[in-house]
Every structure is written in structure tokens, then in C-alpha cells.
Amino acid sequence: MNQRSSNLLDEALGLDQVIEPWPLRGRVVAIEDQVETSGSFVLHHLLKRSLSPNSSNVTIFIAFSQPFSHYDRILRKLGCNLVSQRDNSRFFFFDMLKLQCPDGDEGITPEGGFIALYGKIHKTISALPEISWKNVSIIIDDLSLMEVAANGSSDYVLDFLHYCRTLTSEFDCSLITLNHEDIYSSEDRPTFFIQMEYIADILIKAEPLATGLATDVHGQLTVSNKGRNKVSNFHFKVKENVVECFYPGRS
Amino acid sequence: MAAAKTRTSTFSRNLSTASPSHGPGLKCGPNGTVFLSSGIPDLDKILGGGFPLGSLVMVMEDAEAPHHMLLLRNFMAQGLVLGQHLLYSSPARDPRGFLGTLPSPAASKDDKPRERDPDQEKGLRIAWQYKKYFGENQLDGQRGSLSLVYSLFILLAGPLCEHGADGKHEYSNEFDLRKPLERHFINGPRIDCVSIQDCPDLSTLRDRCATFLSQFPRNDGSISCAGRIAIQSFCAPQCAYSNMEWDMLSFIRSLKSMVRSSNSVAIITFPPSLLSPSFCKRWQHMADTLLSVKAIQDEDKELAQLLTGYQDMVGFLNVHKVARINTQVPVILEATTFSIKLQKRRYLVLECLNQAPVDGSSGTSYGTSGGCSSSSKTGNLDF
């Protein structure tokens, strides 16, 4: 049952057939959620898949929202030990909880801010053996907090994302980001948000059901895969050890 | 009462036996979290135990009523009674004066506000809604037929009551809102007060919070002491920084990251109407636990008809988000709106909303008139 149910999300992402080579390589994946329904479980799921024992993926995790212990506990329940993966140099965790670029301008100076962060990412990838460059995933949790760290200068965040995107073409690695859709829905022209949706190859939206929250169905996911020109929609229920996905009405 | 049910599995670890010893006012929760009490036993139950250490709680104020103060007062008083440290900040010129309004714990067990006699409470929960249709003596006759339902209630409610009672004397208190907290609690050195009215920017408050939180670093041993931070009306217009929206956000972010790595809980209350909609959403995303309070309009006839016990209510509490630390599973409550009641004008009580039975003489069926009118007229309440 578990096998089948978790496959709906994997299927939509193209993760169901082969895990090696990493199907998301060279892709930008944008996850969007709302206050009522958190989309962080998709991040956890992708992290788990990319660190699965029968692949040689490397993950760089840039955390703006939670400390390492939080992810460690969650992934442990999903059957993946982040500490040992970190020791094996398959998992790199950048704790950015306290990163602050007080004035946007300081982000430009090479010492602090996002440029330094990008430098760190680039260095980490370059230090890896060439064979695993293709299998690197960069995960950012989450973009709205990055904007806060830049004190509202979304342009710096966008620049950073574009730099990261060049990595996807330079090294063929993948970029996975989380953002909150409802923040931008009231803005006139949410440039940042629109641009992010534009550069994304795969867009995953987590929304609450129109009828409200229920214990059996935690919300719905819409996965738009631009490459395959396919949109899939299904309901999900988040559990400690697995995310159950099913078509509406089949919970 | 059903709202207190958080575990869905019938098998649950016995947390009380496995837990390492903690200081007063702390108890172990799931996923390696430790709870401290909100000062309102009902709210603790609703949230599954209390506020987890390291979490940021945000309360959206009602722009016209001070109901958030009820939550703040109990939260602060609970900390002081248990000997926990407190940092309080408000836009008032003299925040320390507010400490004089904190409530005192209810005197003794005899004075317990709620009679735990199940005959009084659980049994009548059902009959209660229909009370107005019976005379007092008739009601006694009806009780027999309800006994089946009643025993079901005991079955369901039994484990919950036990959970709250086993040796948790030191965890939380009932507070008597009409009795001020004794002076020796208020004058202690453990209290730090900051006025945010005159601060031109937030660096002072940030430094004060940082110094305060450095007293409770997180290490994996047992926790001897916890801290509480209460920030009232954070974006109030009398604060000089109130139009610096990004600065406020980055303060909240840095406070959150500091609180995460310490044994403390921070509460921020804010009037959402003063923020632009997109910033309001950003603030809500920041919160681990998100609550909102709302006052009841005076003499709202429609609501009075719709809800039982309307005359005791002072407002509504909405639970939008429950903290999810170390877990990805969302907490889905059976009800998210609760009525805030002042029992005997002294004790703060939260209850699920009970829909009053529709008057039989009106001729329409229960389903059509009751169900539809409730959803259309009071759009923001869910039952």
C-alpha cells in the first residue's frame, strides 16, 4: 500500500522509474504553499529520495527556517540518517538561520551575504568528484525568509537564484525551492514570485481543500511538469514515516 | 473536549515514565519537545500539552478589544508563579505597571472553578443544549435515557482527564482574574521590562532579548529553568519603527532563531489590520503557533440564538496553526474556533462552540435552518 501510494508524487515528478541518473537533474523545482497547508513535507520527501541508499546523489541544504535537529528528526522517521549522510559527504547543511544582510548593499561585498553563500555552494560542488556533479541537488528552505534576510531587497535574492540556476546548466545539478504563495497573492506585481514561477521547470503547489482541513486529507497537491507538459492533481495525507498520495475520493 | 485529542493512534508511548526530570512547569511532549503551560489549562489541552520550548507563538489581536491581554496575562502569571524568567515588552511608557494586573492562581483545590463531578459536566453536556425545553424536574427524568450517551462520554473523556491529572501539579494553574498576583512574584529580579515606545529602531529590543535568552542555552541534559518572552502589540503605531516593515520582520526572524536555540517560548501579539496584507501573511508564516482573538459584538441577536451559553462569552479564540517542531505531520484539530468565557467572572475557560437547537415552532427542519444559517451568517465561525 505504501509503495503504491507514495508513487503518485514520484510519478508526477518522474522519480518512479529510475533514481539513477537523478531524474531532476538540470531542473528547477518550485514548491509553493500557504499558511494553512505547509509544503515542507515535499522538501523532506525529495531530500529522502535524493539521499536514498541506491543512488549516489549529493544534497546541499540551505536552511533559513529550521535548525539541523529539526530536519534530522524528521528524516530519521522517514528512514534516512542525515548525520551519517553528512559524514559520508553526501549531505551538506548550511545553517542560515542567523544570516543577516543588514543593508542590501552589503550583499554585494564578497565577505557577507548571498555572494558568500553562493561561493560556498560553488566551492562545495567543485570539490566533489566530477562524476557526481550531475547528481547534486540544492534545496532552499525557504525563499520568503531569504527576502527577509536581505531586508526586503528581493532583487538580491533573485540574483542569487539566477546564479544558482546557472549551476543547473554548468554542473547539471537541480535546484529545489520552497516559497509561500499567499504572501504574494495580494501584491500588485509580485515580480519575485512570477520570475520564480517562470524559471521553474516543475511547479508543485500545496493547497488546503476548499472544504477546510480534515484528518484524513491534509490538502491537495498540483504538480505542473513543464518538460512533460503534464499537470497532475491529487490529495495527500502527511504521516511521520510516509506521505500518502491518492486521487480525490480514494482516501 | 474532543478538541484535546491529538494522537490518532491507540498506541502511545507513556511519556511520563520515560521522561528525564525537568524543572517545574515543564513536561515532555512528542518528538523530543518539552512543553510549558500557556497559563490557560484549556488552551494547553487544545494545543496538545502547551507551547513547546523553542517556539514562537503569535496572537492576532482584535483591533477594538483587548482580548489578547487575557492570553498574555495568564501566560506571564503562569511563568512567574513557577519561578520562570520573564521578559515583557509593550508600547506603554511604563510596562512594569502592567505586571500589577496579572492574575493570581486560584486559592485552593476546594475553590476549583469547575466542578469535575461528571454528573454535572459531562452528563449535562448533551442535555444542556435542550435545557430550555424542559422544566428542572423534567430534566431529571430525561437523564436516564441519556445514560448510554453519557457513559460513552466517560469512556472518551476518561483518558484525557487522567492525562491531565497524573502528577502534573506543578505544570499549570487556574488563575483567578479578579485577584492580583502577590507582590513578591512581581518584584523579583527575574523580570525584565522593556518599553518599545521610545525605541527608534529594534536593535535595543533585540539586544535585550539576546541577553535574556542567553540565560537558557539549549543543551541536551535536563532543563532546569525556562524563560518566557511576551511582546505586546508589536507593530503598534506609537512605536517609532512601526512603518519599517522589513525591520520588524527581520526582528521576528532573528527572535525566532534565538528562541529556537534556547529553552524558552516567545509570544508576540500584533494587530493585523495595521500591516499590509502581504506582510500580515509573512508574519503568519513566521509563527509556529498562530492564534487569533476576536471580541463579540454587544447584543448580537443572531449569534445569541445560534450559540448556547452566549451570555457568558466574551470572545472567540481561533487556532490557525499548531507548532510542528521536529515533525512534518500537521496537527488537525476537530474544532478551530473556541469561545472564551469568564466563569463566575473569575476564571478563563475555552469551550467548543455548541450550536443551540433551532426552535421547533419555526416549522423548518433542523438541517435547513440551523445548518445553512450558521454558515451564511457567521462565515468566520466553524463548528
Image (tube, coloured by chain):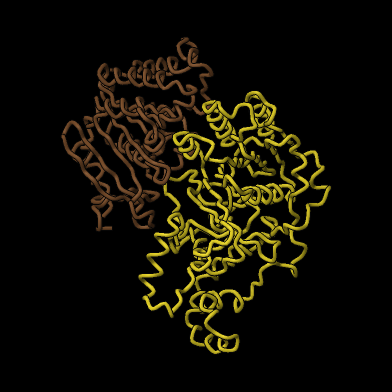
Chain colours: A brown, B yellow
Horizontal and vertical percent for residue B67? 62, 50
Rendering quarter of residue A185:
top left
User: How many discs mark residues in the rendered view?
Assistant: 0
Q: Quadrant of the C terminus of chain B?
A: bottom left
Residue at 49% across / 24% down in the picture? Answer: A149
Horizontal and vertical percent for residue A190? 36, 28
Residue B154 shows in this picture: no
Residue A237 shows in this picture: yes
Q: Nearer the viewer, residue B222 or B79?
A: B79
Horizontal and vertical percent for residue B120? 61, 77
Residue A220 vs B302, above or below: the answer is above
Residue A246 vs B189, above or below: the answer is below
Residue at 51% across / 23% down in the picture? Answer: A99
Q: Is residue A220 left or right of residue B167?
A: left
Rendering quarter of residue A27:
top left
Rendering quarter of residue B349:
bottom right
Residue at 62% across / 52% down in the picture? Answer: B27
Q: Nearer the viewer, residue B112 or B232?
A: B232
Q: Is residue A23 left or right of residue B107?
A: left
Horizontal and vertical percent for residue A102? 54, 19
The residue lying furthest to the top in this view is A109
